[in-house]
């Protein structure tokens, strides 16, 4: 585990002196390991720039993630190829991206559950998926299938809006029997997306995902749900609210998905509403940056040293220096919130917003899993007198998450090709001496 370590308040990056708490870890002894598990539909993203006429021709709704049949897929692919419109073909899938990015950031293991073609051809989609995935992502638990994995046509228009057209192949055939209870029971978190519930006919993915979720719930493993796309949530917000209340501990969403599930268009209010159902919320909001909301026990609350912020909840960031706790672990729960504006005001030029939200979630997962890792190895640390969900404060996690999103925005792929730099080029040497 590459440890989050001690950092300057203003930025995520570690300072020179190592945290004395972290140093209690004896590097010579065999360390207990922590890992996270994610379930996804194994997909390759095929990215192309198109105009509205193109979307209309193939009957695609702009901005939506929609499923297309084999006939439309064939015609679409032929058209993109014949006009040389395909820019990139990358491994994708919202949770697979998150597992990959987690493993790159933490330099540690995550486990991906899903399906994989048993017959893999060099250069084919299954091959591409595997070869574009970090070697730290454990693919040994994937269930073999006799057929193709999925393709996600990621069609980007002039405004940067993305329209996803998916040919699912056999990716929804993950069977409940392929879910290993022990693997989930011993993990630090189970990560799923709303897309896993979009199944039909002979698909078994939803059943498999529910089995995994129930298993995590039974063993007290935090279930992390990312809402994927507002269109799925808008179909039945009540169903999603009930599902989240019953099964989910950490909710990740963007402001549109926040509106769809909570009815609030303000991301802070949407995150606050979701705190009625879960322990921790991360709500990304495009150019507005990101918000987090969580609980802390009165005894462990820490007041911010930053300026108090106005908002729909006045001074909402008052306790942003607190580490997040589960509601049930608080004697006197207090709600804590934080906001971080886009890193450096956002990139000069955004290459692609694909995966920016997934990137933010992978940073949060890194912090959460580092906390479990630290507890497993230095249980007597004073840090664990507080039964916290996260290693760092809401404020620091949100800066870290925001910084990771920035890195995704300045590249084409939703997957990081390397971890974050140890030090920012943009900061003076003197900054690190503080
Ligand atoms: N136009 C933008 N300008 C600056 N930062 C942005 C912009 N779009 C996204 N970001 C950054 O990326 C993060 C995630 O973006 P968002 O678009 O909300 O995610 P999602 O992919 O889930 O829709 C934001 O919190 C912000 O830090
Ligand atoms: N597992 C699924 N992943 C999907 C689906 N539709 C799109 N996507 C993936 O989302 C990311 C982009 O994430 P975002 O946070 O920027 O929205 C991209 O890589 C797609 O592969 C789906 O139906 N299932």
Image (tube, rainbow, N blue to C red):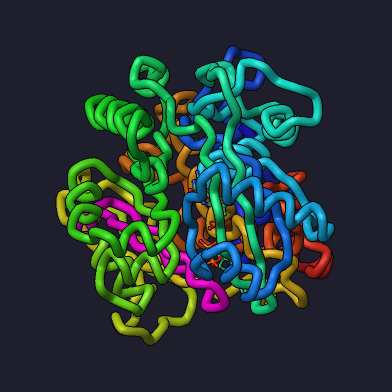
**Residue 397 percent location from the top left of the image:** 51, 56
Above or below residue 177? Residue 300 is below
Magenta range is 276-298
**Residue 329 percent location from the top left of the image:** 22, 43
- Residue 79 is left or right of residue 64, and the answer is right
**Residue 384 percent location from the top left of the image:** 37, 37
Q: Which residue lies at the image location 48% right of the left edge and 31% below the top edge?
A: 36
Asked which quadrant contains residue 151, the reply is: top right
- Residue 330 is left or right of residue 19, and the answer is left
Q: Which residue lies at the image location 34% right of the left edge and 76% below the top edge?
A: 316
> Is residue 375 or residue 267 the one in the foreground?
267
Above or below residue 353? Residue 33 is above
Q: Which residue lies at the image location 32% right of the left edge and 66% below the top edge?
A: 271
**Residue 423 percent location from the top left of the image:** 77, 56
Asked which quadrant contains residue 310, the reply is: bottom left
> Is residue 386 or residue 182 the one in the foreground?
182
Residue 13 visible, this angle: yes
Residue 66 colored magenta? no
Residue 291 colored magenta? yes
- Residue 152 is left or right of residue 371, and the answer is right
> Is residue 209 or residue 45 the one in the foreground?
45
Asked which quadrant contains residue 82, the reply is: bottom right
The quadrant of the rendering that contains the N terminus is top right
């Amino acid at each position: 585990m590459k440890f989050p370590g001690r950092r300057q308040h203003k930025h995520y990056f570690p300072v020179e002196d190592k945290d004395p708490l972290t140093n209690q870890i004896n590097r010579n002894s065999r360390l207990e390991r922590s890992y996270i598990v994610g379930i996804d539909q194994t997909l390759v993203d095929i990215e192309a720039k198109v105009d509205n006429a193109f979307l209309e021709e193939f009957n695609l709704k702009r901005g939506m993630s929609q499923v297309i049949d084999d006939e439309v897929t064939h015609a679409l692919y032929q058209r993109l190829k014949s006009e040389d419109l395909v820019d990139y073909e990358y491994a994708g899938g919202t949770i697979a991206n998150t597992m990959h990015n987690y493993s790159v950031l933490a330099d540690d293991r995550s486990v991906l559950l899903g399906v994989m073609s048993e017959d893999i051809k060099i250069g084919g989609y299954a091959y591409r998926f595997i070869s574009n995935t970090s070697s730290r992502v454990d693919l040994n638990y994937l269930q073999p299938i006799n057929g193709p994995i999925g393709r996600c046509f990621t069609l980007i228009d002039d405004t940067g809006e993305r329209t996803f057209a998916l040919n699912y192949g056999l990716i929804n055939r993950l069977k409940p029997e392929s879910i290993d209870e022990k693997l989930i029971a011993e993990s630090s978190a189970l990560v799923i997306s709303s897309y896993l519930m979009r199944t039909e006919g002979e698909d078994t993915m939803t059943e498999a995902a529910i089995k995994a979720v129930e298993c995590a719930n039974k063993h007290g493993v935090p279930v992390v749900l990312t809402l994927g796309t507002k269109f799925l949530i808008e179909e039945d917000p009540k169903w999603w609210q009930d599902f989240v209340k019953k099964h989910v501990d950490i909710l990740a969403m963007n402001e549109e998905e926040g509106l769809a599930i909570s009815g609030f268009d303000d991301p802070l209010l949407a995150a606050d509403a979701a705190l009625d159902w879960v322990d921790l919320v991360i709500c990304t909001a495009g150019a507005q940056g990101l918000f987090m909301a969580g609980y802390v026990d009165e005894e462990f609350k820490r007041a911010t040293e930053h300026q108090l912020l106005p908002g729909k909840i006045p001074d909402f960031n008052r306790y942003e220096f607190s580490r997040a706790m589960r509601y049930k672990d608080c004697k006197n729960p207090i709600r804590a919130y934080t906001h971080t504006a886009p890193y450096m005001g956002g990139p000069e030029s955004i290459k692609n917003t694909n995966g920016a939200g997934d990137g933010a979630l992978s940073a949060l997962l890194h912090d959460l899993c580092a906390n479990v890792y630290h507890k497993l190895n230095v249980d007597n640390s004073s840090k664990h007198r507080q039964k916290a969900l996260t290693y760092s404060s809401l404020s620091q996690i949100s800066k870290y998450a925001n910084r990771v999103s920035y890195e995704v925005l300045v590249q084409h792929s939703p997957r990081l090709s390397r971890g974050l730099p140890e030090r920012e080029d943009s900061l003076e040497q003197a900054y690190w001496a503080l």
